[in-house]
């Protein structure tokens, strides 16, 4: 009987933690994709081969993105504590973890989106110009439309990265699967928790990748 109760308790704890991981990954993905899209557009437009080349703007924004991308996530967690507390009123917890997760993801997805946009066939762009399309029309109907499959791939890679980061956030009070793996599996020497959490994360990542591949084929 005690074994059954123990298994039930473990399932409840892990189920709650998994929901916390989904919550963190979902909102940090949505926010970072929305926010990161805008610097990607600016980088694409102001690049040397863009519609509005502007070297100072491009190099300054590119430098800022590279700086934020160079920060290890654990260090970023600590640095952003005052900012996180200002936004959500606390620096520890599942909701609080969304802030550093989003901040770490924005420069990554901005660079991925920039690369996807700039891989657009220049012949198509020139053809659009010859038909008298405005820069806005070229941006939306050529750059963005042609880049959707590539940007989708970038989002899938982002989600997978955020799953790993969310597990890392759990080690500093962020909740989620990582928190359970550390508190129960490592600190209390309950191997079953550690193994179960690892299997769940592996399945989660595989499911995300399979869904991404399916969507990519449909869009392409």
Image: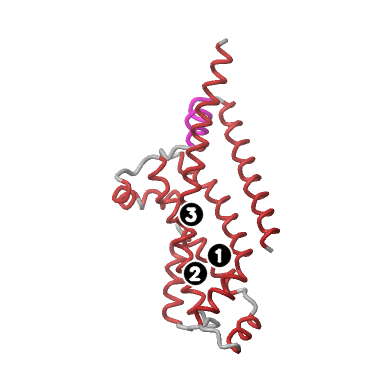
Alpha carbon distance from label 2 to label 1:
8 Å
Q: Nearer the viewer, residue 114 or 76?
A: 114
Evaluate if marks 3 and 2 touch, with contact meaning CB atoms under 8 Å apart. no
Please determine whether, in this image, residue 60 is positioned above or below residue 77.
below
Q: Nearer the viewer, residue 155 or 64?
A: 155
**Spot occupied by residue 63 in the image (x, y as percentages of width and height):** 44, 70
* Magenta stretch prevailing secondary structure: helix
**Residue at the location (55% across, 84% down)?**
133
Please determine whether, in this image, residue 178 is positioned above or below residue 13.
below
Classify mark 1: helix, strand or loop: helix
Q: Which residues are magenta?
A: 179-189
Mark 3 and mark 1 lie on one chain; the one further toward the N terminus is 3
**Residue 185 is inside the magenta segment:** yes
Classify mark 3: helix, strand or loop: helix
Residue that mark 2 sits on: 40
**Residue 124 is inside the magenta segment:** no
Mark 3 and mark 2 lie on one chain; the one further toward the N terminus is 3
**Spot occupied by residue 91 in the image (x, y as percentages of width and height):** 34, 44
Classify mark 2: helix, strand or loop: helix
Residue that mark 1 sits on: 112
Alpha carbon distance from label 3 to label 1:
15 Å
**Spot occupied by residue 25 in the image (x, y as percentages of width and height):** 50, 47
Evaluate if marks 3 and 1 touch, with contact meaning CB atoms under 8 Å apart. no
Residue that mark 3 sits on: 30
Quadrant of res 131: bottom right
**Residue at the location (52% across, 21% down)?**
9
Q: Quadrant of the N terminus?
A: top right
**Residue at the location (66% across, 45% down)?**
206
Per the rendering, the mark at residue 193 is: none
| Residue neighbourhood size for the residue with mark 3, other residues' Cα within 10 Å, grouped as few (<14), some (14–19), many (≥20) | some
| Residue neighbourhood size for the residue with mark 2, other residues' Cα within 10 Å, grouped as few (<14), some (14–19), many (≥20) | many
Alpha carbon distance from label 3 to label 2:
15 Å
């Amino acid at each position: 009987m005690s074994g059954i109760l123990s298994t039930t308790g473990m399932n409840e704890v892990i189920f709650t933690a998994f929901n916390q991981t989904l919550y963190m990954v979902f909102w940090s993905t949505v926010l970072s994709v929305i926010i990161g899209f805008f610097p990607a557009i600016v980088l694409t437009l102001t690049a040397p081969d863009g519609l509005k080349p502007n070297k100072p703007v491009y190099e300054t924004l590119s430098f800022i993105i590279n700086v934020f991308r160079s920060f290890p996530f654990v260090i970023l967690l600590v640095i952003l504590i005052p900012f996180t507390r200002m936004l959500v009123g606390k620096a520890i917890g599942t909701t609080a973890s969304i802030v550093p997760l989003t901040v770490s993801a924005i420069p990554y997805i901005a660079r991925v989106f920039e690369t996807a946009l700039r891989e657009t066939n220049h012949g198509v762009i020139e053809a659009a110009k010859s038909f008298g399309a405005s820069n806005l029309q070229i941006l939306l109907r050529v750059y963005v439309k042609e880049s959707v499959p590539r940007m989708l791939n970038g989002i899938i890679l982002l989600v997978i990265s955020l799953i790993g980061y969310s597990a890392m956030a759990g080690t500093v009070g962020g909740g989620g699967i990582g928190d359970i793996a550390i508190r129960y599996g490592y600190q209390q020497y309950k191997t079953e928790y550690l193994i179960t959490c690892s299997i769940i994360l592996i399945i989660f990542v595989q499911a995300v990748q399979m869904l991404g591949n399916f969507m990519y084929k449909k869009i392409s």
